[in-house]
Image (spheres, helix red, strand yellow):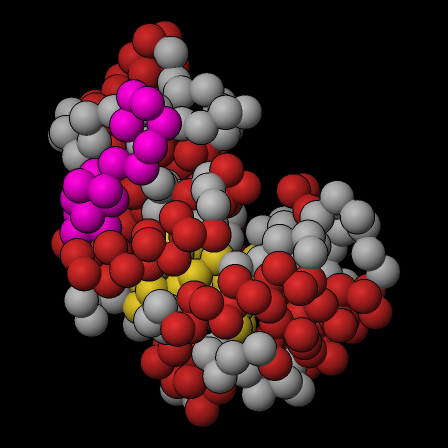
Amino acid sequence: MAILGDSAATAAIDAFGTVGTAMVTPFNDDGTIDWAGVEKVADHLVNLGNDMLVVSGTTGESPTTTDEEKIELLRVVRSAVGTRAKLIAGTGNNVTAHTVDLSERSAAAGADGLLVVTPYYSKPTQAAIAAHMRAAADSTDLPVMLYDIPGRSGVPIETDTLIGLADHPNILAVKDAKGDLFASQTVMAQSSLAYYSGEDALNLPLLAIGALGVVSVAGHVCSDRFARMVTAVYENDLNTARRLSYETAGVVDALMNHMPGVISAKAALEAQGILTNRGTRMPLLPADEEQYAFITAQLTRSGYPT
């Protein structure tokens, strides 16, 4: 099991860090990528306390960006942040050959690790999920974080499947957005897999049962407090961790429970002056004025500058 201080936990922290944000991909009015905006968001996130950036994850609108754009995003983010943060490339999709190819290209472009989501829409069996994950992990020497999010993929990575995948030398961690704390605890107890909270509402509960860190959406705004929460849990200071969880609850609710996270995160970044355009690519639409006002008001109530 990956417990703070043991070799598995050390390997995961060395590979991925502890506080990550699945960063948005800024767009111009014409739908092209706003490369200056990409640099600004990446720099903002590192300055806010992130030591891991996930590029081309769900919040990066990866279903709507081309492979060429994904590779260029890695290069631009690397140029912006240097070695101040680990860059984890979201390479998983619902075609195994495509996942393998994108993983290989991302490694060549300088990614530090891979985030591989459960193949979506097809609802593969557990044996097929395991084979897909092993193919992705075999494709490069990079460390792999599995992304378990059945609400989007349609199927969970079941406990026995996760425990079995832990024997692959490149598969080190799980981004957990399953919402089943007991299942997560079981995998942590019976395998070397390190866990990262992939659901902001459960950041503290997952840390409390053994997760090493977070991969967040609300981290676009409050990674500084999440970083302090992670440290507090490491130091067994539950009172401080609980206080920080309470302090961030309003922002987590605003960003995660009222509209898709990418829409709310871009609205928050515009409200804070990080982005000049909250545009998205269809099928998503950007926050309308009512949604933008809601996000801005919640940031103000929670003590964040707008």
Residue 40 included in the magenta stretch of the image: yes
Foreground of the two, 157 or 66: 66
Res 203 visible: no
x 42%, y 34%: residue: 262
Q: Position of residue 33 (x, y in %)?
A: 31, 37
x 33%, y 32%: residue: 32
Residue 172 as seen in the image, left or right of residue 56: right
Q: Quadrant of the N terminus?
A: bottom right
Residue 306 as seen in the image, left or right of residue 104: left
Residue 23 as seen in the image, left or right of residue 209: left
Position above or below: 290 against 140: above
- Quarter of the view holding residue 232: bottom left
Foreground of the two, 13 or 136: 136
Q: Position of residue 299 (x, y in %)?
A: 25, 27
Res 38 visible: yes
Q: Position of residue 169 (x, y in %)?
A: 57, 88
Position above or below: 179 against 64: below
Q: Quadrant of the C terminus?
A: top left
Q: Position of residue 128 (x, y in %)?
A: 81, 66
Total marks shown come to 0
Residue 287 included in the magenta stretch of the image: no
Extent of the magenta region: 28-45
Position above or below: 78 against 253: below
x 62%, y 53%: residue: 93
- Quarter of the view holding residue 215: bottom left
Foreground of the two, 176 or 127: 127
Would you say the magenta stretch is mainly helix, strand or loop? Answer: helix
Foreground of the two, 274 or 100: 100
x 38%, y 18%: residue: 287
Residue found at the far top of this picture: 290
